[in-house]
Amino acid sequence: MNDRTAIGFRLLNEFQRDFPLHPTPYALIAERLGLDENTVMSAYAEGLASGVVSRIGAVFAPNRIGSSTLAAIRVPAERLDAVAAQVSAHAAVNHNYAREHDWNLWFVVTASGPDSRQAALETIARETGLPVIALPLRDEFHIDLGFDLNGGQKRVAGAARCPPRTLSAAEEALVRALENGLSLETRPFAALGARIGMAEETVLAQLRAWQDEGVLKRFGVVVRHHELGYTANAMCVWDVPDAEATLLGCRLAGLDGVTLCYRRDRAEPHWPFNLYCMIHGKSRQEVHARHAEINTELGLDRYPGAVLFSVRRFKQCGARYAERGAA
């Protein structure tokens, strides 16, 4: 690894969670790494241009603000591109993937509340002419605490069901301003605040308060796994007894190789599974091997399950919480 590659790696890996909430964050990062501010901003600009970096910004805890759900459609193969385009056109949809299963189109809908979320799902079903199953989050065990590129120790959230948070008008404005990420300039939080009439110190204070409350999972660099070489991306699901789901979920979340882990409502009779995890690897063989090890270690091979590899990414962006029309 040459010096430039090593610097880029550190900028991606070390600041997914610990990005400085400071008036001059890029200068502070530069100081920590023995660089200059322009080098840091240029490296992040390259990451954004290449697609390795999705954005630098806020990752909110599921359903603390707004309302979100995973959803799926069983799409005839010849209609997949057309239906995926219809789904992706909705601003409420922030992730949209094709996966290997009869239920082959998987997407996340995020809206300002349960009613608008349901309205978005109904609109998608009406536009596509296909049934949509919704799989709301029940418990989170390990969700979006960053993606350790070193394979080191991860931070696991533990099972949680936090109540929704009602935002003030000023907070709503800040959420909307954060959607596209932080700009690459010397005082990005001041620039962010200027767009909504909020002082720099108020922006930073609010972000810190959200972190303390658990409204923000993290603030930092959001990377794209595929562009980093983790091209084998599998959603692994099991149908486990409800009484065992929390214990199994907490154990599953702590295992190496598990990048996300949560429990969702079933959608009987179409979808019986309630325990989920994501495994990202550099090959299918690697993912299959880790899945087999996990099955054996936790005894999950006693229960019905499935492995759904992602085969196409139609849309991936930060969640949009405001009421809006098509993207």
Image: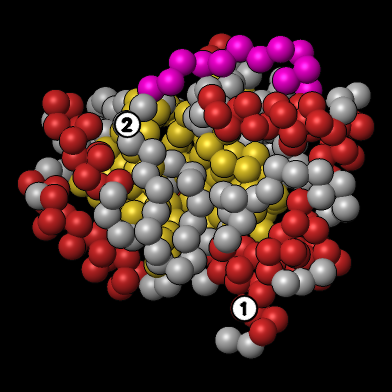
Residue 231 seen in this snapshot? no
Q: Is residue 27 left or right of residue 319?
A: right
107 to 18, vertically: above or below: above
Instruction: Residue 188: name its quadrant.
Output: top right
Q: Position of residue 38 (x, y in %)?
A: 86, 66
Q: In the drawing, what numbered circle is on residue 159?
A: 2
Q: Main secondary structure of the magenta part?
A: loop
Q: Which residues are magenta?
A: 161-173
67 to 8, vertically: above or below: above
Residue shown at 37% from the left, 44% from the top: 156
Q: Is residue 265 left or right of residue 145?
A: left
Residue 302 seen in this snapshot? yes
Q: Position of residue 253 (x, y in %)?
A: 30, 46
Q: Position of residue 173 (x, y in %)?
A: 78, 23
Disc 2 to disc 1, C-alpha distance: 35 Å
Q: Is residue 319 left or right of residue 269?
A: right
224 to 166, vertically: above or below: below
| Residue 32 magenta | no
Residue for badge 1: 6
Disc 1 residue crowd, few under 14, some 14–19, many 20+, Cα 10 Å: few
Disc 2 residue crowd, few under 14, some 14–19, many 20+, Cα 10 Å: some
Residue shown at 38% from the left, 38% from the top: 157
Q: In the drawing, what numbered circle is on residue 250?
A: none
